[in-house]
Image (spheres, rainbow, N blue to C red):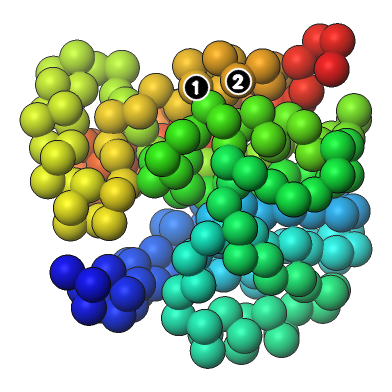
Amino acid sequence: MKLYAEYLFPRLMDWMMSGETFQRLRAHLLKDTRGNVLEIGYGTALNLPHYPATVTHLTLADPARLLRSKVRQRTAQAAFPVTVEEQPAESLSFPDRHFDRVVSTWTLCTISDPERALREIGRVLKPDGLFLFLEHGRSDDRHIAVWQDRLNPIQRVAACGCNVNRRIDQLIEKSGLRLVRLRRFHMSGVPRVIGEMYQGQCVRGNGD
């Protein structure tokens, strides 16, 4: 299992998530990034080519270091400084109100304590900052949701901890962040049990 998790699965994930639809969705989400940016759970750094020139510095944070040579290659091609940090989203080392944008793509499905991670995101966001997210999660169709619950134990093993049945919007709201934009859709070319998407923007909660 260690061989699969550390060698085979990262390569499979990198190949699958390099597809045209994934890249189009990344580009659409990241067009609003600017300034000092934090990306949590960066994986193999597939988002990097889609960050615009308005980014002044990008920090990548992830407890796992996957395909390090690919990550080095992709960060070396960036048009702005990139710092790579080996740390979990649940306990970020950065100061309060530090980042203009925080980004998460296909990450909240895997984090062991997503509410704690979201609270940390709120902590490190500047008062006028935005949290930009693109995640898959629980369907509003109860028939699809039943199958998500049934298949989730298998998914967690096959995809190294990924969950298909998390209500991303509810997790965000419980964390104290405030949703200002949310788009729900089914990702084309992907089975609905794993392709129910949540895309949106959040700000710090009132009074933060």
Q: Which amino acid, by three-letter code, is at mark 2?
A: Ser
Q: Please tell me the numbered disc located at residue 63.
A: none
Q: Residue at x 53, y 89 (%)?
A: 69
Along the line of sight, the residue nearer the viewer: 133 or 181: 133
Horizontal side, residue 70 vs residue 102: left or right: left
The answer to whether the residues at label 2 and label 1 have Cβ atoms under 8 Å apart is yes
Residue 25 is situated, as x and y percent measured from the top left of the image, at: 52, 51
Indicate left or right for 59 with 98 as reference.
left
In x, y percent, where is residue 13?
Answer: 34, 67
Q: Position of residue 166 (x, y in %)?
A: 35, 28
Q: Is residue 131 above or below residue 34?
A: above
Q: Residues within 10 Å of mark 1 (few under 14, many from 20)?
A: some
> Which residue is more in the foreground, 104 or 176?
176
Q: Amino acid at mark 1?
A: Leu
Residue lying farthest top?
207
Q: Compared with residue 8, is residue 169 higher up or lower down, i.e. above or below? A: above
Q: From the image, which quarter does the C terminus lie in?
A: top right
Q: Residue at x 28, y 29 (%)?
A: 165
Q: Which of the labelled discs sits on residue 171, or is there none?
A: 1
Q: Which residue is mark 2?
A: 175
CA gap between label 2 and label 1 equals 6 Å
Q: Is residue 109 left or right of residue 156?
A: right
Image quadrant where residue 160 sits: bottom left
- Residue 26 sits in which quadrant? bottom right
Helix, strand or loop at label 1? It is helix
